[in-house]
Amino acid sequence: MSTQVHANLTEEQVTTISEDLDEPEWLLETRLEALEALADLDMPDVIRTPGRDWTNLDALDYESFVDPLDRAQEKDRVEAEGVDVLSWDEALDQHEDVVEEHFGSVVDPQRNYLTALSTALFSAGTLVYVPEGVDAEDVKIRTTMNSQSLFNYTLVVAEESSSVTILEKQETGEDRDGARYYSGIVEAVAGENAHVQYGALQQLDEETYNFSVKRGHADTYGQVNWIEGNIGSRLTKTSVETRLLGDSSESKIVGAFFGHEDQHFDLGSRVWHEAEHTTADLITRGVLDDHARSVYEGVQDVGRQAWDTNSYQRENTLMLSDESEADASPKLIINNHDTEASHSATVGQVDEQDMFYMTSRSIPEQVAKNMLVEGFFVPVLDEVEVDELRDDLEELIAQRLRE
């Protein structure tokens, strides 16, 4: 079907959400502008490989599962000393100037149809505000979706010479008949010499369609690092991005996924090098079983003024069945000769020689395969610097192998 979900939405519904959150007039206007723009916006670009579009977002029946006023949820926020981790109404009450300065400054509210839809309808909002000079760990945001659809928004602002480590988890709670839709937008701003590490674990049930954008801006000597684990959902369309705006800024994007049955993952990672002496590292590993499908696109974009750039990318997918499908499209866009960059991608099956070696030593075939899968994930799990997230991923991988 065409993207006509906006025909079911009204200004009154959007105004109700805004009033319930006690939002200022400028934010309501931003929501209403996004609602009005829906009629002219296209769906997000999907990853294409020669001869094939892997993901068809237009085919989803949004009208059947997007109800803007059904937004039941459980939200658990754990803050660290010196850091404000606030619900949306608290954020606007205590730090409206911070919200107004940065909301929509990293992710354009009208970037595409689904970001505009999320801007108009988000009801689960969080501000993580890290004042200058504060170092904090163990900030946690847990969202349990108890509605047919839920639109989530998170803003992270780390002031100069501060640092913060955040773990976000999304899961579904109450059972609902039919498909569900979850949307999550994350904007992260790292000031001069600030460090943001954002880990996310998606465990939505397998009747849920998931759309997410995580995007960060890093100032001089700043760092924005992303860790993303995708285990759940029926279909996930996700983009994880960083703009390196200041000299000597850095970013690492780490991803892990495990699909089975008919799950579909459309995964994008992108970094823009826009200043001198910047560094980026993109690392993704995933496993597919049954009829699961994945497509990955990683882009390293080096600008004309990005002298002395270092940018690396590697993606590996392991397929456990003949019916699973995977493709990868790593890309380099180099506009500066003073650049050291590389990219690689592999798609393959469990190595027959490894299997023979293990089974010939009396290890049962299934046990041997599980051991190889767990070993396959080790290089990416070693890059996960959030202990709880790494432990959760290891357990979820082992659990899926036991299914």
Image (tube, grey):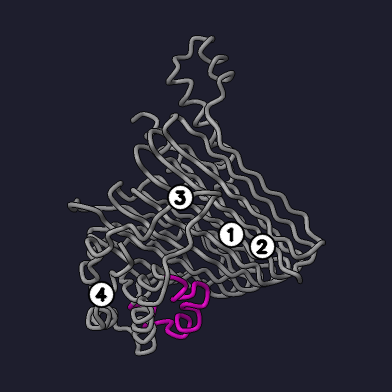
Label 4's element? Answer: helix
Horizontal and vertical percent for residue 209? 33, 55
**Tag 4: amino acid:** Ala
Label 1 CA crowd tier, 10 Å (few <14, some 14–19, many 20+)? many
**Tag 1: amino acid:** Arg
Q: Is residue 35 above or below residue 333?
A: below
Q: Nearer the viewer, residue 317 or 216?
A: 317
Locate the C terminus and report the quarter of the image it occupies. Answer: top left
For marks 2 and 1, the one nearer the N-term is 1
**Tag 2: amino acid:** Asp
Which residue is under mark 2? 301
Q: CA distance from mark 1 to mark 4?
A: 33 Å
The reply, left or right, for residue 366 in relation to residue 221 is left
Q: Are marks 2 and 1 in contact (CB under 8 Å)?
A: yes
**Tag 3: amino acid:** Trp
Is 106 covered by the magenta stretch?
yes
Which residue is under mark 4? 7
Which residue is under mark 3? 54
Q: Nearer the viewer, residue 395 or 164?
A: 395
Which residue is under mark 1? 270
Q: Is residue 22 above or below residue 287?
A: below
For marks 2 and 3, the one nearer the N-term is 3
Horizontal and vertical percent for residue 328? 56, 46
Q: Are marks 2 and 4 in contact (CB under 8 Å)?
A: no
The part of the image, by quadrant, that contains residue 181 is: bottom left
Query: Which residue: 27% across, 59% down?
Result: 61
The reply, left or right, for residue 25 in relation to residue 343 is left
Query: Which residue: 56% across, 69% down?
Result: 134
Label 2's element? Answer: strand
Q: Which residues are magenta?
A: 89-112
Label 3's element? Answer: loop
